[in-house]
Image (spheres, rainbow, N blue to C red):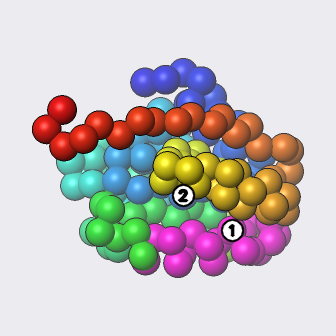
């Protein structure tokens, strides 16, 4: 529902970058008009929305469709991470070739939250991987104070 987030995802699609989406993340892919013709794993409640957008919802830990990797839920994170890293390690040519006849190449929108006092490590990781970005990434640092249980 955030127009800037949808524009960000659409720009990644237009630039031909890999995409990773988990749980309800594919809603943003739908909003960016990039779901049509894809196999996408997502939380089961997205099944109808994905089908209506022209995608095939799959019940898999991690689904790779060309340059898109998706997963259903947080329990799938180990398989999702494994496939996401494998996808991000591929060259743009390998990614494009993996989806024969594709008119668009998908990108990624990632929401990252670091553990308290570990934000700099995440920032260093992202900035230390320039091959993942054709343009400098936009990194917004936020700090979230955790409330004690029951508050």
Q: Which mark is residue 20?
A: 2
Q: Is residue 90 shown left or right of residue 57?
A: right
State the residue lying farthest toward the left: 150
Q: Which residue is drawn at 35% across and 40% down?
A: 146
Identify residue for label 1.
88
User: Residue placed at 41% from the left, 56% from the top?
Assistant: 22
Q: What element carries label 2?
A: strand
Instruction: Give coordinates of residue 124: x percent, y percent.
Output: 75, 57
Against 72, residue 9 (above or below) is above
Q: Provide residue 50's location: percent of width, then percent of height.
A: 34, 47
Q: In which quarter of the image is residue 76?
A: bottom left
Main secondary structure found in the magenta portion: helix
Residue segment shown in magenta:
79-96
The quadrant in which the N terminus is found is top left
> Could you tell me how far apart the alpha carbons at marks 1 and 2 are, in whole angstroms?
9 Å
Percent x, y of residue 140 = 65, 35
Helix, strand or loop at mark 1: helix
Image point (61%, 49%), residue name: 119
Q: Contact, CB < 8 Å: mark 1 with mark 2?
A: yes
How far across and how far down the image is residue 73, in percent?
30, 61
Q: Is residue 88 located in the magenta-colored stretch of the structure?
A: yes
Where, by quadrant of the figure, is residue 100 drawn?
A: bottom right
Mark 2 burial class by Cα count in 10 Å: few <14, some 14-19, many 20+: many
Tell me if residue 85 is in the magenta stretch.
yes
Q: Which residue is drawn at 63% across and 37% down?
A: 141
């Amino acid at each position: 529902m955030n127009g800037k987030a949808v524009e960000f995802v659409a720009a990644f699609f237009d630039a031909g970058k890999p995409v990773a989406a988990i749980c309800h993340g594919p809603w943003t892919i739908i909003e960016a008009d990039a779901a049509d013709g894809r196999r996408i794993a997502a939380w089961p409640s997205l099944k109808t929305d994905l089908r209506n957008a022209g995608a095939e919802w799959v019940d898999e830990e991690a689904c790779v469709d060309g340059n898109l990797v998706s997963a259903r839920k947080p329990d799938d994170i180990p398989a999702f991470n494994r496939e996401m890293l494998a996808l991000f390690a591929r060259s743009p040519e390998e990614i494009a070739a993996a989806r024969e006849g594709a008119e668009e190449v998908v990108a990624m929108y990632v929401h990252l939250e670091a553990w308290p006092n570990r934000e700099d490590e995440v920032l260093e990781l992202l900035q230390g991987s320039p091959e993942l970005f054709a343009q400098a990434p936009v990194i917004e640092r936020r700090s979230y104070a955790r409330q004690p249980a029951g508050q």
